[in-house]
């Protein structure tokens, strides 16, 4: 029931637990900009990743009415026309890879790594990312609504003022009463800085999900212009927990948004829960079919869906379903494969992996938790369900997966191609496995050594810089003095 203790203690995010009605904790889904760099344009060094946003080459294909796109209603307007003549990345139908390109590592080759502290004094940091191709800055997302810049060219100083303070500039404000509410995720447009938009995922003052864009200020790249941009999607939340959190662009140029099952515990809404609900007409029951899903958007036409999404669902935005609480998910910046860390209920944490461009998969919740059927999940029919590539049992503090990234940096060569992740409850271990396209081909219980005992407070997220090096955010010793670490060779 309340195995949530550890996660709650740090006011975590997306941890398993149930919250039966007390406005508690919940989960989140999240993702982080796994797309490679946009190559050339501009600024500051750093070749982006190799993974590819597909470039359709067009000039301003979507064009359209544009302007500065101030906060149009949800029915319309994502500032489609701005920079229409320069934008090159479009959300297109997905393509697939022939192979993951990964090979299984030889036994006994796991390196020793350490976590080097980069910054401290952050307030509940829950994510870190870089702008495409920008090796000079990191952006730390704080749950209470601030986004802060780490100046990598100036001793990793935390710049003041903050890049953005989301609550003060939203008419509705950002609700942050529950441990899983607040500002949960961020992504830059893959064409940044040509396209100045960035995207955030948060719960508003009603506790409902909002995903929308703002822009980087044209006058100062270290400040956001919150008068620009517009909505992508709003989803009512039936409970305070399981709100997901990740947003990130995929290799197809589309924005992926992870939403948890809406909350409480055991996905109690409706006859089959939210994760399995694909029927828009269930609105009469108060269920929203977008809960318990990975959604996928064309940010230039957010209401019409993206090519290749699940058809016949009544809404055009569903990519994957049967998901409980995808706090963090990511794309392999080299291959475009999708890795989803899905927070479990009472027993099992899991990682789902799908080859680039697959989608339309049912990951089982709440019929299954991990690889097994669960009480209260309905008939145990596994036909059509996609099991996780990796799972582990609760115990020893483990109860809340924090999905990570496939390592594509250069500082730790032995980790090339490994997917790294952690657990918010146990928190001092970073686990790793390799997915070779068919399955997990090594034992994830091999923990990197030494344990990352110098991390202060529980791990809340991983993040990538522009060259694919990996970072960790933690809440810090008191839950408020948050820290940022970089993984390095020991
Ligand atoms: Ca919720
Ligand atoms: Ca599952």
Image (cartoon, grey):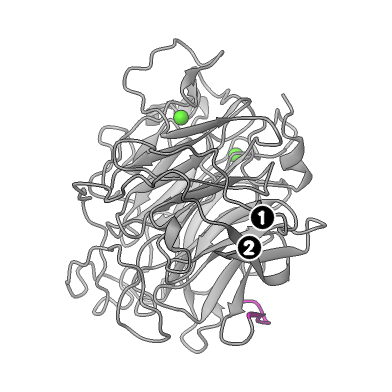
- The residue that label 2 is drawn on is 115
Along the viewing direction, whichever of 318 and 333 lies nearer the viewer: 333
| Residue found at the very far bottom of the displayed protein | 219
Indicate the quadrant containing the C terminus: top left, top right, bottom left or bottom right: bottom right
Q: Main secondary structure of the magenta part?
A: loop
Q: Can you tell which mark lies on residue 452?
A: 1
Say whether disc 2 or disc 1 marks the residue closer to the N-terminus.
2
Instruction: Residue at 63% x, 34% y: name it.
Output: 16
| Residue found at the very far top of the displayed protein | 379
**Label 1 crowd bin: few (<14), some (14–19), many (20+), radius 10 Å:** some
Q: Could you say where residue 488 lies in the image, as x and y percent from the top left?
A: 56, 66
Along the viewing direction, whichever of 489 and 55 lies nearer the viewer: 489
Please say whether residue 158 is one of the residues in the magenta stretch. yes
Asked which secondary structure carries label 2, the reply is strand
Numbered circles on residues, count? 2
Give residue 149's quadrant in the image: bottom right
């Amino acid at each position: 029931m309340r195995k949530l203790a550890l996660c709650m203690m740090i006011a975590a995010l997306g941890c398993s637990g149930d919250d039966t009605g007390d406005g508690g904790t919940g989960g989140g889904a999240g993702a982080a900009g796994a797309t490679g760099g946009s190559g050339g344009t501009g600024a500051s060094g750093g070749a982006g990743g190799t993974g590819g946003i597909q470039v359709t080459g067009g000039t301003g294909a979507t064009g359209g009415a544009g302007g500065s796109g101030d906060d149009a209603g949800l029915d319309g307007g994502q500032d489609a026309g701005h920079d229409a003549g320069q934008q090159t990345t479009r959300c297109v139908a997905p393509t697939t890879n022939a192979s993951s390109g990964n090979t299984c590592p030889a036994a006994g080759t796991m390196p020793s790594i350490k976590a080097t502290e980069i910054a401290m004094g952050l307030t509940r940091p829950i994510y870190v990312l870089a702008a495409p191709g920008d090796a000079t800055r990191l952006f730390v997302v704080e749950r209470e609504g601030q986004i802060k810049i780490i100046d990598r060219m100036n001793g990793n100083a935390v710049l003041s003022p903050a890049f953005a303070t989301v609550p003060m500039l939203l008419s509705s404000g950002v609700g942050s009463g529950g441990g899983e509410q607040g500002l949960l995720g961020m992504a830059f447009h893959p064409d940044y800085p040509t396209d100045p938009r960035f995207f955030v995922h948060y719960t508003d003052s009603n506790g409902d999900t909002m995903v929308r864009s703002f822009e980087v200020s044209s006058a100062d790249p270290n400040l956001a212009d919150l008068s620009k941009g517009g909505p992508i999607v709003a989803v009512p939340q039936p409970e305070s927990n399981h709100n997901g959190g990740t947003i990130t662009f995929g290799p197809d140029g589309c924005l992926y948004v992870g939403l948890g099952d809406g909350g409480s515990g055991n996905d109690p809404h409706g006859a089959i829960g939210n994760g399995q609900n694909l029927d828009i007409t269930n609105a009469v029951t108060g269920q929203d079919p977008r809960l318990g899903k990975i959604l996928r958007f064309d940010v230039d036409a957010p209401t019409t869906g993206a090519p290749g999404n699940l058809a016949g669902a009544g809404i055009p935005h569903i990519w994957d379903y049967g998901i409980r609480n995808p706090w963090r998910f990511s794309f392999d910046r080299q291959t475009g494969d999708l890795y989803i860390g899905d927070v479990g209920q009472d027993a099992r944490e899991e990682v789902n992996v799908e080859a680039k461009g697959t989608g339309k998969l049912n990951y089982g919740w709440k019929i299954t938790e991990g690889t097994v059927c669960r009480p209260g999940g309905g008939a145990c029919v596994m036909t059509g369900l996609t099991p996780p590539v990796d799972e582990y049992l609760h115990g020893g503090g483990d109860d809340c997966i924090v999905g990570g990234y496939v390592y594509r940096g250069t500082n730790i060569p032995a980790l090339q191609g490994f997917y790294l992740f952690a657990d918010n409850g146990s928190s001092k271990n970073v686990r790793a496995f390799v997915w070779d396209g068919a399955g997990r081909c090594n034992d994830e219980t091999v923990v990197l050594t030494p344990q990352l005992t110098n991390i202060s407070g529980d791990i809340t997220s991983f993040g990538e810089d522009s060259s694919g090096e990996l970072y960790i955010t933690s809440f810090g010793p008191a839950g408020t003095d948050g820290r940022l670490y970089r993984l390095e060779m020991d």
